[in-house]
Image: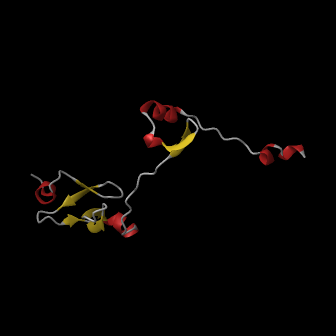
Amino acid sequence: MNNTEKYYGVEELYCWDCHKVLEVNDDGSLVDAEKLKVQKGSDGTPSIVIKCKTCYDKNNKVVIPQACEVYSRVVGYLRPVTQWNEAKQEEFKARKVFKIKNDEEHNTNNG
């Protein structure tokens, strides 16, 4: 059993930002890393986030990414894509995006 399993219950610890594998001393202390306590979840359960020293020195705050709800038009209505049926979601993934030049850019040489 390595020190990470012994003290943290996982095989390896990773930096929150750069995902570098972190080292743990025999006493359970982290090598060149910092622990940050954050509130996570709607119930306010405290969680521990670990950053390597380099990432901690760059930014000692924790950014927890959130999913972005995407809306698009399907059958005449704007709806969240996650609420579409599976076939419509596949059609959405296959859509191609086109950029149309506006009239000012298109007609600059015409006068």
Q: Quadrant of residue 32?
A: bottom left
Residue at image position (56%, 41%) is 77
Q: Is residue 57 left or right of residue 30?
A: right
Res 4 quadrant in image: bottom left
Residue 72 x/y as whole percent? 54, 42
Quarter-of-image position of residue 37: bottom left
Q: How many marks?
A: 0
Q: Image point 25% across, 63% down: which residue?
A: 47
Front residue of 24/109: it is 109
**Residue farthest to the right?**
111
Whole-percent x, y for residue 56 in the image? 34, 67
Residue located farthest toward the top when viewing the structure as drawn: 87
> In the rendered view, would you say 16 is above or below 35?
above
Q: Nearer the viewer, residue 79 or 2?
A: 79
> Whole-percent x and y of residue 61?
37, 68
Single out the residue that lies furthest toward the left: 1
Relative to 55, say whether 102 is above or below. above
